[in-house]
Image: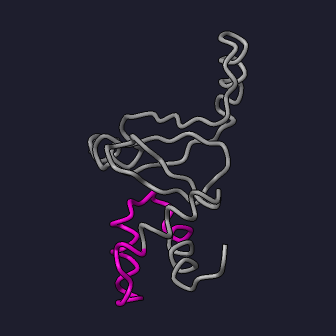
């Protein structure tokens, strides 16, 4: 993959905004520092980065395609109040894929597991 200044900006934006943003959110952030960038450019480069394993596409969290700069094995937690998406350490249940393979014979290549509930911040707000 050839170097692209815009692609580099998109990747840097993802790394600095670890909120699992949609393409539109990345575009909104970038538009402030790179006014000439188009939404189509953001989409094309996010998909190119994902196709090359540099970032991850996350489907089905909340009905929107989101992007994650963290390509290591991990799970997600989505707050049903504020809609924020948090990374959950893979070590909480590292043997899940092994158990699935042992029980079913399936070969697990990757997984996207998400939990839904109320985050700590929203929990504090409801307790006050």
Figure quadrant of the C terminus: top left
| Residue 54 occupies quadrant | bottom right
Instruction: Residue at 64% x, 52% y: name it.
Output: 71
Question: 124 and 81: which one is in front?
Answer: 81
| Main SS of residues in magenta | helix
Instruction: Residue at 51% x, 82% y: name it.
Output: 6
Instruction: Residue at 45% x, 33% y: name it.
Output: 115
Relative to 67, residue 113 above or below: above
Q: How many marks?
A: 0
Relative to 44, residue 79 above or below: above
44 relative to 12 in the view: left or right: left
| Residue 93 occupies quadrant | top right
Relative to 8, residue 112 above or below: above
Q: Where residue 18 sits in the image (x, y, percent)? A: 51, 62
Query: What's the colour scheme?
Result: one colour
Question: 21 and 90: which one is in front?
Answer: 21
Residue 31 in the magenta stretch? The answer is yes
Residue 21 in the magenta stretch? The answer is yes
User: What residue range appears in magenta?
Assistant: 14-41
Q: Where residue 120 sits in the image (x, y, percent)? A: 42, 44
Q: Where residue 36 sits in the image (x, y, percent)? A: 36, 90
Q: Where residue 81 sits in the image (x, y, percent)? A: 28, 44
Figure quadrant of the N terminus: bottom right
102 relative to 60 in the view: left or right: right
Relative to 9, residue 68 above or below: above
């Amino acid at each position: 993959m050839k170097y692209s200044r815009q692609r580099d900006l998109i990747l840097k934006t993802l790394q600095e905004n670890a909120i699992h943003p949609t393409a539109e959110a990345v575009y909104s952030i970038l538009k402030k520092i790179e006014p000439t960038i188009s939404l189509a450019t953001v989409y094309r480069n996010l998909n190119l980065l994902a196709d090359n394993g540099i970032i991850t596409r996350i489907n089905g969290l909340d009905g929107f395609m989101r992007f994650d700069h963290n390509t290591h094995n991990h799970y997600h937690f989505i707050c049903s109040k504020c809609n924020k998406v948090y990374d959950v350490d893979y070590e909480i249940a590292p043997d899940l894929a092994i158990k699935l393979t042992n029980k079913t014979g399936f070969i697990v290549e990757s997984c996207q597991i998400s939990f839904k509930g109320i985050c700590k911040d929203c929990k504090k707000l409801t307790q006050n």
